[in-house]
Image (spheres, rainbow, N blue to C red):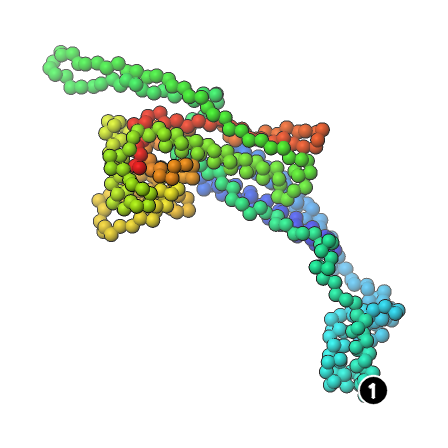
Amino acid sequence: MNTTRMRLERLGDERANTYAKIEDTLKLAEDEQRDLDELEQKHLANWREQVAGLDDEINQLAADLERAEGSRDVSELLRGDRSAQGPAVHVGDGPTVYRTFAQYARDQLIVRLPQIAQLAANGGDVVATRAAAEERLERAVANTLTTDVAGLVPPAHMAQIMDIIMTQRPVVSSGRQVNLDRGKLTYPRITGRPNVEKQATEKTETTSVKMQVVLDQIIADTYLGAGDLSWQTINWSTPDALALWFDLAAEDYARETETAACSELGTAGGGTVSAPLGTTGTESFGAWRAAAIAGQSAIYTATGGRARTNTLYLSAQRFFQLAGLGTDQTLQVSSVGSLDIATMQGTWSGLRVVGSYGFTNANSAIVGDTDAFLVGETSGAPVEMRVVEPAIGGLQVGVIGAFKSKVFDSARFIHLS
């Protein structure tokens, strides 16, 4: 039943890995306090269907193995009187057959220790007893190890690919989400505000400013990935190659769109604070503190106090630099903050901190108002696509999604460096 046992172990590992993927997907949605998206729901349905099929076969194999292990060993009955031939049996003129390790150890002791040989002779010829034991040892079957039959032992592969699939987009998630159901992202922008002023004297006319609102449009960008998998790859792979392809494609879609959002923040900001941070890694605690507060003050002045400056966006290098700073000051008028190294998020000087791998400029440090940062994306992106190729036994697969981010008021963002 070695084959049954091997298959049962492999299916058990596959089921455990599938359960792990289900738990990881649910945990990600729970950590982000959101509902499952369409892609995650499809993956969960597929994995649960796989688990149901695995459970059926595992139960059958387990029952077969239990019956086999519970059955009576009838080999001794078939050997008949061979058991009366002493501790070891000669099959014709062939090699010695040791039924147990104890029989083999007995002969080894007789050969090596004269006292044991004398006891085994039981008053008979000790030399003959020892010679018989030596003969049986010489005629014993040679050991065959797995290294001697490497071609018959299948290689063991890990049932789980050791890789980190990360689809988080911290900068994208921080913006104002807009559903992108067309090829354009349309939003209103105020260009003229009415004014209210104190009346000079009774029945004197006030000045008047016309309210103006324009409708801006930007063209969405399309992100597309494609591949071609054979029927054999899809159906004979462990773990599921098709599900893995879509997972990896979704990860790359997330990285591309996160980088695009970071690029928009990096190029659309409204200038730099008057006392900018210097070269990454050389700034002190006081320099960071002064720059963050100066950035908030500059935005407040530029927008007439209308902007809610609430976020500090940092590249990975800048985040880890800030997280490692210390100070010998014992008193702060306002709260300093707290940063979580694992998630690259937290608070600093009253601002929410968002660190991201998407900033290609390692020196990026931007203060701004998330309400002025629009993020438009097609529902359910990236959308999965499948095209069957019956002529060649394959399946063309792909993911696609439309995405666009936009800072619609550059005065609400400012660079610290």
Label 1: element kind:
loop
x%, y% of residue 54?
66, 45
Front-most of 131 and 4? 131
Looking at the rendering, in which quadrant would you find the C terminus?
top left
Q: Is residue 122 left or right of residue 179?
A: right
x%, y% of residue 44?
57, 38
Callout 1 amino acid: Gly
Q: Is residue 120 above or below residue 356?
A: below
The residue to which callout 1 is attached is 124
Q: Residue at x 80, y 85 (%)?
A: 126
Any part of residue 108 in sight: yes
Single out the residue that lies furthest toward the bottom.
Answer: 123
Q: Residue at x 26, y 14 (%)?
A: 210
Front-most of 24 and 374? 374
Name the image quarter holding residue 304. top left
Q: How many numbered badges does the structure rendering display?
A: 1
Q: Is residue 142 above or below residue 11?
A: below
Q: Is residue 121 left or right of residue 184?
A: right
